[in-house]
Amino acid sequence: MTMLTPNVPFSTGQDRAGQNRGGQDRAELGRAPSPTPPIRRIPDRTDAPLTALLKSWEALLLLLAAAIFTANSFASPYFLDVWNLSDATFNFTEKAIVALALAFVILAGEIDISVAGIIALSSTLMGATAAAGQPMPVVVGVGLLTGLACGAVNGLLVTGLELPSIVATIGTMSLFRGLAYGILGDGAYTRYPEGFAYFGQGYVWEWLSFEVTVFLGLALLAGFLLHRTSLGRAVRAIGHNPTAAAFSGLKVRRIKFWLFAATGLAAGVASVMLTSRLGSTRPSIATGWELEIVTMVVLGGVAITGGVGTIPGVVLAALVMGLLTFGLGLLNVSGIIMSIVVGVMLIAVIALPVLARKLSNRMRRSTP
Amino acid sequence: MSFWKSMVLPVALAVGLVATPAAAQDKIRIALVVKSLGNGFFEAARRGAEDAAKEVGNVEIIYTGPTSTTAEGQIEVINSLISQKVDAIAVSANDPDALVPALSKAMQRGIKVISWDSGVSAKGRMLHLNPSSNALIGATNLKLAAATLPDGKGNVAILSATATSTNQNIWIEEMKKALPTFPGMTIVTTVYGDDLSDKSYRETQALLKAHPEVKTIIAPTSVGIVAAAQAVKDAGKIGQVHVTGLGLPSEMAGAIKSGASKSFAIWNPIDLGYTATLLAYDLVKSKAASVAPGTKLKAGRMGDITVGDNAEAAMSEPFTYDASNIDQFAKIF
């Protein structure tokens, strides 16, 4: 009896540490999740900083982005045009902004798939506010607050009722979009106040759009929070082992609640931009975005099991996906092929490091 | 070691996928943007567009669209077309309003924009091509009914959708307006099947009993026409009562085969793609910034098309489907 029971509360933590970090305490470098090798090799020293950087997930993504960029420049005469590249960023910045916040949620071992539903409900309420004749700042405020409130609902369901986040957010995904359909039906809001178009169509300087500027600012903020503050360390610790984190004195529930609320707010920001870019709202707005956003986070090297991942990885993943779809679009590759390419790329990029590690382990073992 | 190995495949993949030669630049490039790819109706429209391109020569058709029917997906496609500096965009829109900013940008950059099939608000396009007009639909329904009556004389009845359906009521009104041009034909009654199969079926059964003098039923609704044909067949009145109206070839193939319906009408997607392409071509050639009502545009085998109010144009009367072509089109839509 006593031999068997003590394992239970700690077993997940042990497995996870073994899986994700391979015995090295280098979580900052964001290794890919990998299954435990048959014989665990414990290195007698860690890699030199430069080698470690080169072997990192971010280096792989950066090289992939550079390769796609170069290939696109050769393949299409329209690619290397600063305005075209600026236009291309509109296709992914809104999703990338949500991905930045969602990365924290996934790092903490949870998930939120209601983000597209939040965008729809937020956009619908903004439309209703605008239709009631409210000025632009009120409309934007309603959009952001709706996002925050929806995120708080998710946070309460997960931390208060202790529902599994996947179940809770599947529910709210339908709920938020359902409310949007309930309010709008098959109608549309098409009248937005003067100046509202700036958020999704405006430029801060020359070709630098407002959307990209906000995205870069938020990326810096997210990077700082995750990699330079105790909050970042706490989020990762929760993802690795919530029980251990709670015993270490971290306020696990409170932190998780605010991560969900922040993701809702980010969806609100994305909703303001998307609504402004479309100049109208229909309840079907942002359909299917939740999966694209989760794809970005996972491609960015954030382990879906939590604990491991970096913000530069997520930013690079957004860039890789944006460049790839834009490049293929310029060549008029059919969207059906495009979704196959994105799928293959995701599997390849995630499977390759695992494959390479297995191979190198085998080689090491055969040559003692 | 493992690092370099891990790099090989993604790079090869990326290079291999995008390294296809760019298209020739001197041709007029017209983009046919559809609601979603993998839809038979739009594949047929593409065939028409290719026909038109061959006919005028020196035109390249870019057939594209999102994989699901979303406005966001279409905007991505439109952005990419703007970047490629295509000459014209002809779009069947997933959303009449959400595409307006993207299409306005295209027009600012000198791209000619028209919508067809499913329209865009007037601000977002230079011209909208409707497959047909209400007057033409009304007249076609009567023409098809006349073809089933001896010498075009006799009693007909209408099976509509709901009593409040705007389209249906306009078409019925147009039929009544066109009736004097069909002497000897009388519209006995109008019944409403609410666009529900079972209600349309029951209404037709009741109609056959209450008005045995009715020789032809006109159902300008794709749900009603199928139900009416079935009711006529089940009542054993094939050959005595004919069903016609507006329907989809794939749903009406059985009724044509059984003889419950001799012919019916609906727009032809091949003609629609063909005409949209030629109108876009006309606009590129004319270099005009907008299209005034009353302008005549050339549309090849479809004849001249006059632009009406709100820069909307109607292609032609609906295309007639019968035993000679039903198999071909039943596969398309």
Image (cartoon, helix red, strand yellow):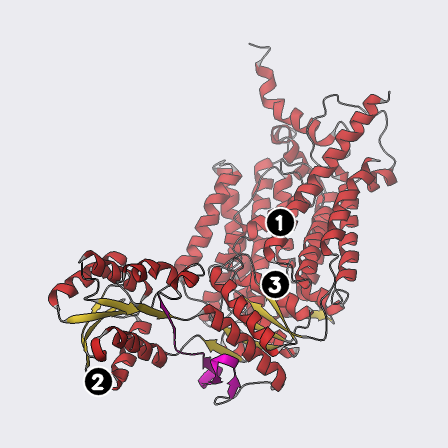
Give the percent coordinates (x, y) of residue B160: 26, 68
Q: Is residue A178 above or below residue A50?
A: below
The correct choice, above or below, for A178 with respect to B319 in the image is: above
Residue beneath the point at 52% across and 81% down: B300
Q: Which dot marks residue B76? A: 3
Q: Chain of mark 1?
A: A
- Label for residue B183? 2
Residue under the point 43% across and 62% down: B328
First to last magenta residue range? B296-322
Cα–Cα gap, marks 1 and 3: 17 Å
Looking at the rendered structure, whether the residues under marks 1 and 3 are on a common chain is answered as: no
Q: Residue furthest bottom?
A: B294
Distance of mark 3 from mark 2, alpha carbons?
54 Å
Q: Which of the two labelled residues, at mark 3 and mark 2, occupies the earlier sequence position?
A: 3
Q: Splitting the image into 4 quarters, where does residue A144 fall?
A: bottom right
Contact? badges 1 and 3 (CB < 8 Å):
no
The answer to whether residue B319 is magenta is yes
**Which of the image's four quarters has the N terminus of chain B?**
top right
Amino acid on which disc 3 is placed: Glu
Q: Measured along the vertical axis of the image, is residue A359 above or below residue B193? A: above
Nearest-to-viewer mark from 1 and 3: 1
Q: Secondary structure at mark 2?
A: loop
**Label 1 SS:** helix
| Label 2 chain ID | B
Residue, disc 1: A340
The x, y position of residue B150, in whole percent, is 21, 76
The C terminus of chain B lies in which quarter of the figure?
bottom left
Q: Is residue A26 left or right of residue B170?
A: right
- Tell me where residue B197 sits by quadrant: bottom left
Question: Residue A281: in sight, yes or no?
Answer: no
